Amino acid sequence: MPSGGSAGEVEADAAARLVGGDAVPDEAVPAVGADAERTIEAALRRWEETGTEAVIIEVEAEPDPGRRLHRLLLRATHQAAADPLEVSLLASAADPRVAATLTRVTGRRIGYVTALFAELGFPEDEARHRGLLAYTAYLGHTQLGHAVPRSLPEGAARDRYLDGVIDTLVRPPQASGETEHVRS
């Protein structure tokens, strides 16, 4: 902590950085106490809006649910690769403010992706399963991209890899009687 500063100043400064400096107006970045708490809450709400709701609105312009899913997953993974904020927030999940925001965002994102799979014709349980699988693939890709970036393909190879992930997710289940793998 800088000398002469309080914990509230550090929290408020961190909250301002959390949303990229200018996402919270200067007058909304007070220095201490309850004001710092409000600043952190505002920063988290701003991340929720720009990182989830705005993205959903953007991809909703695409009428085809398969293309919408493809566009969403490509956009989300590219955005996450460029910005470590998602990884930082996940690492801060012990903070009740962050945990509450992550719970809302995760529910919204999985719900939206699940709805896309349902639009693609998957039954409700299968759509939920695939929505969860898609979201965990996104989170794993995001974490790996920041922790060990050389382990992931780059450029056009990255796009081909992500296309393969998406193709796997939208592939219909095999006909009854056939199994993809043996369960014990």
Image: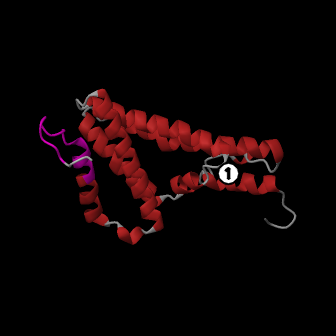
Residue 28 image offset from top left, x and y in percent:
72, 43
- Callout 1 crowding tier (Cα within 10 Å): few <14, some 14–19, many ≥20: many
Q: Nearer the viewer, residue 174 or 87?
A: 174
The mark tally for this picture is 1
Query: Residue shown at 60%/50% (left/top)?
Result: 19
Q: Is residue 23 above or below residue 116?
A: below
- The local secondary structure at tag 1 comes to helix
Residue type, mark 1 in image: Ala
Residue 81 image offset from top left, x and y in percent:
43, 59
Query: Residue shown at 27%/34% (left/top)?
Result: 65
What secondary structure do most residues of the magenta stretch adopt?
loop
Point out the residue furthest to the right here: 4
Q: Is residue 13 above or below residue 40?
A: below
Q: Which residues are magenta?
A: 165-180
Which residue position is annotated with label 1?
15
Query: Residue shown at 40%/48% (left/top)?
Result: 136
Query: Residue shown at 36%/69% (left/top)?
Result: 151
Q: Is residue 53 in view from this perspective?
A: no
Q: Is residue 145 above or below residue 62?
A: below
* Left or right for 126, reference 145: left
* Left or right for 85, reference 163: right
Color style of the picture: secondary structure
Q: Is residue 123 magenta?
A: no
Residue 171 image offset from top left, x and y in percent:
19, 42
Point out the residue furthest to the front here: 184
User: Which quadrant does the N terminus fall into?
Assistant: bottom right
Q: Is residue 19 in view from this perspective?
A: yes
* Left or right for 129, reference 24: left
